[in-house]
Image (tube, rainbow, N blue to C red):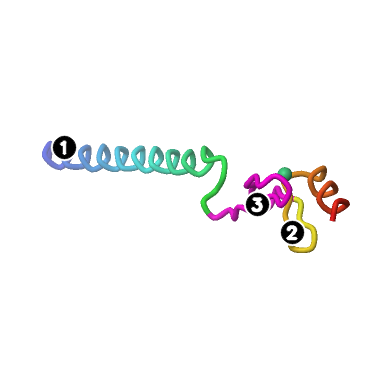
Amino acid sequence: MSRIIFILVLLVVGYLLLKSWQRRHDLTQQHKNTSGKIPNNTRMVRCLHCNLHVPEHEAISQGGKHFCSLEHATQHLTKS
Ligand SMILES: [Zn+2]
């Protein structure tokens, strides 16, 4: 009888260890996803005015041209 209890305790402890390991694994995965400033799938575009590379979603796009800031966009577009 004590053998069965021992096996049950082992199973419960094993289950709990697995659960805590999974939670820790999930947390580190989440941390990895949020700690990177720029996700790997972000396309980088070059500012036509100063050649600075910026993520596409942060760039100012005007007629297929990309700029790092509104200031550079207006400077470049008024110049040409
Ligand atoms: Zn620029």
Taking depth in this image into account, of 61 and 10 the one nearest to the observer is: 61
Query: What is the C-alpha distance between the residues marked 3 and 1?
Result: 65 Å
* In this view, the mark in front (1 or 2): 2
User: Start and end of the magenta stretch?
Assistant: 41-59
Proximity of marks 3 and 1: CB atoms separated by less than 8 Å: no
**Which residue carries the number 1 mark?**
6
Q: Is residue 50 magenta?
A: yes
How far from the left and from the top, in percent, is residue 26? 43, 43
Q: Amino acid at mark 2?
A: Lys
**Which residue carries the number 3 mark?**
46
Please report whichever mark, 2 or 3, sits nearer to the chain's N-terminal start.
3
Label 1's element?
A: helix
Proximity of marks 1 and 2: CB atoms separated by less than 8 Å: no
Please report whichever mark, 3 or 1, sits nearer to the chain's N-terminal start.
1
Question: Which residue is painted at 38% across and 42% down in the image?
Answer: 25
Q: Amino acid at mark 1?
A: Phe
Give the main secondary structure of the magenta stretch: loop
Label 3's element?
A: strand
> Cβ of disc 1 within 8 Å of ligand 1?
no
